[in-house]
Amino acid sequence: MAALLAGASALGSVLLVPGVKRLALKGGAVDVPDARRVSTRVTPRLGGLAIFLAFALVIGVFAGLGKISLALAPPRALAFFVAAMMVVGVGTLDDFRPLRPHAKLVVELAAALVVVYAGNCRIAGISVPGRPALMLGAATVPITVLWIVLVTNAVNLIDGIDGLAAGTSAIAFLTIAVIAYGFGYPTISAFAVALVGACAGFLVFNVHPASIFLGDAGSLFLGFAIAVLSTYARAKESTGAITIGTLLIVALPVGDALFAIPRRYFQGLAVGSLRSHLAGLTRVFQPDRNHIHHRLLRVGLGQRGVAWALYGIQALACGYALYLLVRR
């Protein structure tokens, strides 16, 4: 059933991309080459809308046919889709007409709160192998919201070259699917498998040289889905704790983001000036060309070479995550 689910999502994505591409070109949702972009030609974005629609349609059809039982976790499924539509919606608006970073952040926070309160998506603790889980107590909700927003934007930040964000996300979803299935969460596993297929179908158009980009509609949605589904698919359901293995699934995008935030903040910072600190906070949201993929491009790897190198790192991290969970 997993192969059928992934195949249907991949086919849906392939069929939807051309229509989304036309919509993006007609509405002006395009990337124009400039000093910070790697692309050298005008390229439509909004590709993530095709991924989301393919995913949602396939899940709906399979649920209607009784192949996926959403009744096993109705609040979680409903909360996830409502919050995902919020994220895709703000990303789509941004693809057509760039929004201020804080406007997107407000929607991301609201979406995170939807899954935290309506979908019971909570990180109650962190489990380290060989030691009792570190419980978060009163910090559970803010840490969970921070996690979701961080991963959502981390995937958005690595979406800087053809195929990178969609490919690394597909590897993450495949890992989540295996973990969820192994620990008895078939609905979460089905969601992740469908997203693997949707990403794979989109990559037909997104590998270098890409004819369409994810856009914020896609990168924000993929990051949000990874954050939420990896939190649901946890080995420590009884305590509500996530494991180090869960953190490894997002090690590549989050690691890059955690380097980018202080790098941007401290660039040109005058420590004794409040105005400079406020400007530093603004710089955090301004794109640059110092992400890991940009650095690899500068050492001579082409876009495909960089993408495959980072796919390998993502696969190693996710493989080790599975190893840790299997031997627990």
Image: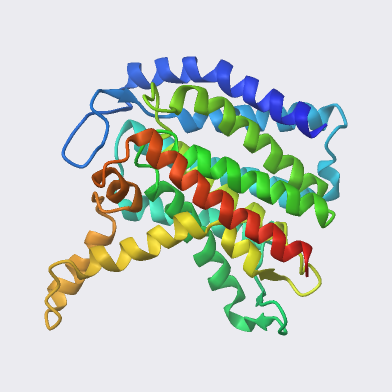
Residue 300 or 37: which is nearer the viewer? 300
Residue 161 is situated, as x and y percent measured from the top left of the image, at: 36, 38
**Residue placed furthest toward the right:** 66
**Left or right side of 175 for 298:** left
Q: Quadrant of the rendered structure where residue 69 is?
A: top right
State whether residue 242 appears in this view. yes
Q: Is residue 128 above or below residue 176?
A: below
Which quarter of the image is occupied by the N terminus? Answer: top right
Q: Nearer the viewer, residue 209 or 154?
A: 209
User: Can residue 109 be seen at all in this image of the molecule?
Assistant: no
Q: In the image, residue 22 lies at what x, y percent?
A: 41, 15
In which quadrant will I find the C terminus?
Answer: bottom right
On the picture, is 53 further left or further right than 46?
Answer: right
Q: Nearer the viewer, residue 131 or 195?
A: 131
Residue drawn at (15%, 78%) of the image: 274
Q: Is residue 96 above or below residue 157?
A: above
Residue lying furthest front in this view?
A: 300
Q: Looking at the image, is 83 positioned above or below residue 14?
A: below
Kindly identify the residue that appears in the image at 83 percent across and 37 percent down. Answer: 68
Task: Name the residue: 58% across, 67% down.
Answer: 144
Q: Residue 273, how many percent across, how many down?
A: 11, 79
